[in-house]
Image (cartoon, rainbow, N blue to C red):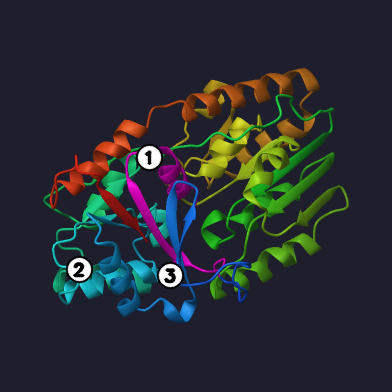
Amino acid sequence: MRSVSALVEQLGNEIDFYVITRDRDAGSDAAYPDFQSGEWRPVGRGKVLYLAPDELSSRRLVAAAREIRPHAIYLNSFFGPMSLRLLLARRLGALRGIPILLAPRGELSPGALRLKAFRKRSLLRLSPWIGLHRDVVFHASTECESHEISRVLPRREVPRIARNPVVVRQATGHACPKTIGTARFVFLSRITRKKNLHLAIDLLRSLKGSVTFDIYGPVIGRADRAYRRQWHALIDEMPPNVTVTYHGPIAHDLVASTLSAQHFFLFPTASENFCHAIVEALLAGCPIIASDRTPWRGLAQRGAGWDLPLDDGDAWGHVLQMCVDMNAETYQTASLNARSFGHQIASTDTVVENLHLLRSVFKEQCDVRNSPGVSGV
């Protein structure tokens, strides 16, 4: 979770972070090797408690929180099982007096709510009746996300806004060589239906020239595995001039070099509240071709890519073919513009914003000057 790891890395000298998470990648049956599950261990500037799936009960989560005695609990999902278990335990009287800060991470956007709509709408209707989110402080990454949260969950207190921190990794300073009539497109993200990978594959079908499309990212849940059959079937039907390859998950320390070896980042997502992958692609000098449902708008005006309406297939086709036909000089300029915009985003001082956000929550329980701690789940 890039948002969480960046937060810990940037603020770990100011705040004690204790992170509770699974002992394996989501959807995997194999635990991480070479460590003991159930013990706090130092990771970067925080401490992490890895728990096996059968340990992620409300009782165990509450016990871990009581062990830490945190000044606040930060929940990194609205619909996530761990968030719901802790909120229910809190509603039943556990964790009394501990403020809760919740980051929905785009889960309350219109595009996200259209997926598994019945289950999500049911929870949203139930929440006010049982007071599930009563007195919970909401963290929005942008003004737009703040409005989305307020529209779905009308509250007296508006969400508090703090932009996501970005940790810059070293990437090559040279654009991928480009010739007219060829293009390398890349998709890098957790693969869910919301990301519209099937649409990205289908958009490439009609292009003329030599096209490659490399896909990186994990397929996690049962619904995502069912979705995988859909986009895999599309790959099998691609014309000979379009080569599509799924590479599976990728280690984060390989992301920058992998993106630098591509020409364009193709991402027709249905909704994003931030999207670290877009920022990392920009930093790698990889211009963006994304939907207009991310915070990164006005890409064409910056010369760093394009943000396009999902329902305008002609616009997508025109831009993609233009990318294939682009010459080396034009691409070099676009790559430099992308890298410049990425560094502009990464250089934004988000430390003060996030420190103020966390300390504003701490004030509800303690004097923030006495080494406050925060536990993240």
Give the farthest residue toward the right: 240
Q: Residue at x 53, y 25 (%)?
A: 343
- Tell me which segment is drawn in magenta: 1-26
First reached walking from the N terminus: tag 2 or tag 1: 1
Q: Is residue 325 magenta?
A: no
Q: Residues within 10 Å of mark 2 (few under 14, many from 20)?
A: many
Judging by the rendered image, the residue that carries numbered circle 3 is 116
Give residue 201's mark.
Answer: none
Query: Could you tell me which residue is drawn at 78 percent across and 37 percent down?
Result: 183
Between discs 2 and 3, the one toward the N terminus: 2
Type of amino acid at the residue the image marks with label 1: Leu
The mark lying in front, picked from 3 and 1, is: 1
- Camera-nearest residue between 361 and 344: 361
The quarter of the displayed image where residue 11 is located: top left
| Label at residue 11 | 1
Query: Which is nearer the eye, 361 or 260?
Result: 361
Q: Which residue is depicted at the point 64% across and 43% down?
A: 266
Q: Amino acid at mark 3?
A: Lys
State the CA–CA distance, disc 2 to disc 3: 30 Å
Amino acid marked by disc 2: Leu
* Mark 1: few/some/many CA within 10 Å (<14, 14-19, 20+): some
Query: In the image, is residue 9 part of the stretch drawn in magenta?
Result: yes
Instruction: State the residue at coordinates (60%, 35%).
Output: 169
Regarding residue 136, the answer to whether it shows in the image is yes
Quick check: 227 above or below 105?
A: below
Which numbered circle lies on residue 95? 2
Circle 3: element type? loop
